[in-house]
C-alpha cells in the first residue's frame, strides 16, 4: 500500500499536533487519541449478456471521463449483496436485479479523494443477463455502454482495481 497521509494537521481530540501515521493508525503524541483508518469495503459488478460487458463512464473525480464497472462503497450495517443492489439501482435504475449476483473475487485498491487516501477491498460479482436490461445513467455515471469483452481496451479503464479485475475476469 502507498504511504498513508494524515488528512489533518492536528489531533482531532486535543487539537495539538502532530498526529503520527503508522500504516493505518493515526496516533496523537500528546493525548491517548488513536484512530484506525481501516480498509473500506466496496462492490462492483460484471453485468454481461451474450459476450458483452456493461461499462459505465465516470461522471466525477477520481478518474472522471474514464470507463468503469458499476458499483460503489458499502454503507455501515449493509451487506456486500445489499450494497451491490443499492448501487445498481442508484447508478443504473437496475431494479430488481435481472439475475442473482455471483461472487467472483476481490482486489485491494487505493482510492484518493479530496486529499484523503482510502485503502479499499473491492469485491466483484457476476450478473449474467438473458436479455439486455433497460438502464439509465444516474448519480456518478454519465453514460452506459455495452462492449464485447474481447474488444475492451484496458487503458480506457480509469481505476486500478477495475482494470485489474477486468484483466482477471477476461483471463478466467
Ligand atoms: Zn491528541
Image: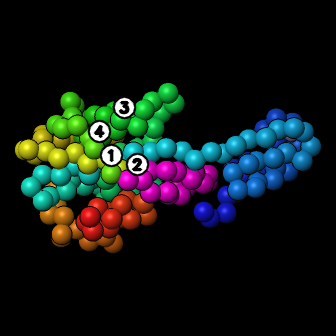
Q: Is residue 24 left or right of residue 78?
A: right
Query: Is 166 part of what is drawn in magenta?
Result: no
Closer to the N terminus: mark 3 or mark 2? 3
Closer to the N terminus: mark 2 or mark 4? 4
Residue 114 coordinates in the image, percent (x, y): 57, 51
User: Does the image show residue 144?
Assistant: no
Q: CA distance from mark 1 to mark 4?
A: 15 Å
Closer to the N terminus: mark 1 or mark 2? 1
Q: Residue at x 17, y 47 (%)?
A: 128
Q: CA distance from mark 2 to mark 4?
A: 14 Å
Q: Residue at x 39, y 45 (%)?
A: 43
Residue topped by disc 4: 88
Element type at mark 4: helix
Q: Is residue 110 left or right of residue 167?
A: right
Q: Which mark is residue 103?
A: 1
Residue topped by disc 3: 82
Residue 122 coordinates in the image, percent (x, y): 44, 50
Residue topped by disc 2: 123
The reply to whether callout 3 and callout 4 are in contact (CB within 8 Å) is no
Question: Quadrant holding ligand 1?
Answer: top right
Element type at mark 3: helix
Q: CA distance from mark 3 to mark 2?
A: 13 Å
The reply to whether callout 1 and callout 2 are in contact (CB within 8 Å) is yes
The reply to whether callout 2 and callout 4 are in contact (CB within 8 Å) is no
Q: Residue at x 60, y 54 (%)?
A: 117
Amino acid at each position: 500500500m502507498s504511504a498513508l497521509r494524515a488528512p489533518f494537521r492536528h489531533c482531532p481530540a486535543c487539537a495539538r499536533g502532530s498526529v503520527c501515521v503508522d500504516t493505518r493508525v493515526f496516533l496523537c503524541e500528546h493525548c491517548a487519541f488513536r484512530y484506525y483508518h481501516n480498509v473500506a469495503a466496496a462492490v462492483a459488478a460484471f453485468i454481461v449478456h451474450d459476450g458483452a460487458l456493461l461499462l459505465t463512464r465516470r461522471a466525477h473525480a477520481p478518474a472522471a471521463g474514464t470507463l468503469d464497472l458499476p458499483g460503489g462503497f458499502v454503507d455501515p450495517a449493509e451487506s456486500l449483496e445489499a450494497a451491490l443492489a443499492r448501487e445498481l439501482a442508484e447508478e443504473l435504475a437496475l431494479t430488481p436485479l435481472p439475475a442473482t449476483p455471483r461472487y467472483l473475487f476481490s482486489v485491494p485498491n487505493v482510492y484518493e479523494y479530496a486529499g484523503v487516501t482510502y485503502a479499499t477491498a473491492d469485491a466483484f460479482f457476476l450478473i449474467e443477463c438473458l436479455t439486455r436490461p433497460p438502464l439509465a445513467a444516474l448519480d456518478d455515471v454519465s453514460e452506459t455502454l455495452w462492449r464485447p469483452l474481447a474488444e475492451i481496451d484496458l487503458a480506457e479503464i480509469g481505476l486500478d482495481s477495475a482494470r485489474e479485475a477486468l484483466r482477471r475476469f477476461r483471463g478466467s
